[in-house]
Amino acid sequence: MKITVRVLPMTERREYPRMPIVSVAAVVFKDNKVLLIKRKYDPGKGKWSVPGGVVELGETLRDAVRREIFEETGIFIEPREVIDAIDVIIRDKDGNVKYHYVIIDFLADYKGGELSPSTDADDARWVDIKELRNYALTSSCEKLFKKLHLLRSE
């Protein structure tokens, strides 16, 4: 499987954007474990989430999720179906929109590769589903895992 990694200048601001930023993420399973990354940057810095990132101009959602998961973790995946689409809107103390991401979440199959966190992640791990409660998850990741019945709603 060939993944093209490109380093392009970020022409759109991520903080205080002019419009929502389209992003992708993937829930990837391997041996009853799920792939998580520890976020290095805001929003959600220091919390755990499924890997993903911003869709580049001219890139399909499926190509974007393959590239982003590989860039963040060194893992090759094959996306299956879309399992959720969420808005992450974070406002500053004055009520201005500081971040606005529209995230398309995929279910994906692990295809290979050695787990290695990138410069965008402080850590990357295969986490046993029974241990998810022990991780400080982003609120969007927690909601996603509850929807998938990986965490119980309380």
Image (cartoon, helix red, strand yellow):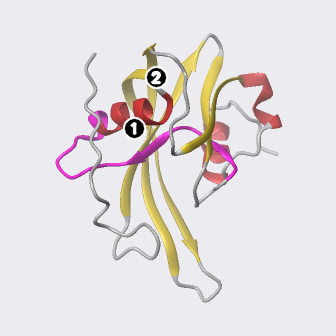
Q: Is residue 101 above or below residue 16?
A: above
Which image quarter: residue 20?
bottom left
Q: Is residue 23 above or below residue 82?
A: below
**Residue 60 percent across, percent down from the top left:** 23, 40
SS for tag 1? Answer: helix
* Mark number displayed over residue 68: 1
Q: Is residue 131 magenta?
A: no
What residue is at 62 percent from the left and 25 percent from the top? Answer: 34
Task: Count the marks.
Answer: 2
| Residue 81 shown left or right of residue 122 in the figure | left
Q: Is residue 50 magenta?
A: yes
Q: Amino acid at mark 1?
A: Glu
Most foreground residue, 61 or 76:
76
Pointer 2: what residue? 75
What residue is at 65 percent from the left and 19 percent from the top? Answer: 33
**Residue 50 percent across, percent down from the top left:** 56, 38
**Residue 145 percent across, percent down from the top left:** 64, 37
Q: Which badge, 1 or 2, comes first in the chain's sequence?
A: 1
Part of the protein shown in magenta: 46-63
- Farthest residue in the bottom direction? 94
Which image quarter: residue 111?
top left
What residue is at 72 percent from the left and 24 percent from the top? Answer: 129
Q: Amino acid at mark 2?
A: Ile
* Mark number displayed over residue 113: none
| Residue 49 shown left or right of residue 153 in the figure | left
